[in-house]
Amino acid sequence: MLAAGVALLLSGCGLTIPTDPDGTLDRVRSGGTLRVGASPRPGWVEMQGVHAPSGREPQLVEGFAEHLDAEVEWTVAGEEHLVTMLEDGELDLAVGGFTDANAWMDKVGLTRSYAEVDVDGTTEAHVMMVPMGENALQSELERWLDDHGGAS
Amino acid sequence: MSRGADPAEAGHGTGRFGHTELPPRQSAALRKAKRLEVVTLVFMVTAIALVYATMGSSQAMKTAWIEDMLALVPPLAFLVAVHRARRRPSADHPYGFHRSTAIGHLTAAVALLTVGLSLVYDAGTGLVRAEHPPIGTTHLLGVTFWSGWLMIAAMVYTGVGPFILGRMKLPLSEELHDKVLFADADMQKADWMTAAGTIVGVLGIGIGLWWADAAAALLISMSIVHDGWRNLRHASSALMDERARTFDDKHPHPLTREVDEVLQGLAWISDSRSRVRDQGHVFHVEAFVRPIGDAPTIDQLEEAVDAVRSLDWKMHDVVLMPVRDLPDTIPDPRANDQ
């Protein structure tokens, strides 16, 4: 109740919660480009020659971009490089079959896991990476994945 | 005085510290304080569980969680200290066990200072490294909402308890002259202020001010460090037999002056000089008196001791020494009476 009240009050002042400190979500929506990094991982991100990445996660990303009225601009690189680019604000999103147990937690924002898979008896909870603290983008992506991410 | 068989030990008798029986008001205050501390412990355990469940990857919430754990220290210190202080003096402990309070005070002060310093470090490094705290969404009972709201709700819960409990403990700490309880009230103040700060901080993050959480925490941590340092300083001085001070350590205790006033008011005493130290709840008095004329009689000496003891229930252990000249090794308490 209180939370809803505060939210209403703030939106009355032209503020939305959450808002990105660096305005990523607004920029993607108005600029029409979603800059996505991809690192190959069989079953999640497939690379076929010089084409754009394909597979489960690239498909999800394309769908999310469409939801934001944006085109995806792909960058294919190794995981560490993608993390650096996210930190430097050169990417808006990164996929690569990442799990919530990955080592980059304190450098990038991880979405809530959108899919859980059993691998050799342990459960892998799959996540995507977003720039740290871009909470509006992260929340929008998590909501979208709630509706579309589970379907494999 | 026999140890074991004491009617006060059973059920709700009068409380006591060592062989000092507490007056009814203090007895009631002691019972209430014990109950409050048990309530505090139970409440803090629920708060710890709640914050743990909602903290996610938020560093600010993690700090709040560690603080909540440290907030268990003062109530535990209080309960242990009053339990020990009840014991009567023994051959090995002729002064009784009152000092357990001072140890409890020191322990609580260290916990409070640790909370403050960890908060300073955390908020400071967060600001310097320009960390943007990530707060995503939570999916609960079929609804997806921003996790910030959940954190705010958790902070409202963890803040309300200490706000009320701390206020209830302050008057009791004065009544009982219990500094552990006073330090605990400070800890509860630190708790609710941190909760309030986190709420402001999370709302700030919500509107895109990444530094809001760390800045709010840094401001609040200053006051916590200040309280922790003050408690630590006075707890240590009290262990070094500093002159007794008021429950909040703000002033020298008025009783330290009243001892000499009451002694000098007696007809046979021309002058006196006394040392009053805080044993924990109760005071230990050593008074040197210069009689007018001849050596005082035993009756006169006992009358003087009674006069000092009747000043206050805290006047627990009074040693009176007639001397020809006042010892100049004891400074005049009025010389530095701030």
Image: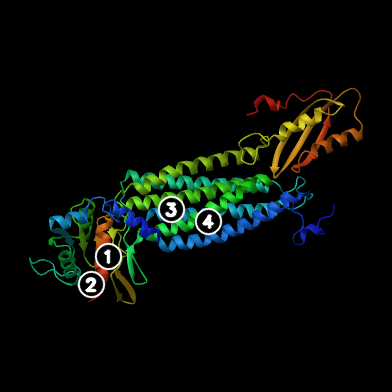
Task: Point out residue B83 in the picture as x, y percentages from the top left corner.
Answer: 69, 55
Task: Point out residue B333 in the picture as x, y percentages from the top left corner.
Answer: 70, 28
Question: Are the residues under badges 1 and 2 in a single subunit?
Answer: yes
In contact (CB < 8 Å): disc 4 and disc 1? no
- Give the residue at mark 4: B161
Residue B112 in view in this figure? yes
* Nearest to viewer (mark 2 / mark 3): 2
Which residue is more in the foreground, B273 or B259?
B259
As measured in the structure, the alpha-carbon distance from the residue carrying label 1 to the one carrying label 2 is: 10 Å
- Give the residue at mark 3: B63
- Give the residue at mark 2: A148
Q: Quadrant of the N terminus of chain A?
A: bottom left
Which residue is more in the foreground, B138 or B234?
B138
Kind of residue at disc 3: Thr
Q: Name the secondary structure under disc 1.
A: helix
Determine the image quadrant of residue B277: top right
- Give the residue at mark 1: A142
Q: Is residue B235 above or below residue B267?
A: below
Q: Is residue A29 above or below residue A124?
A: above
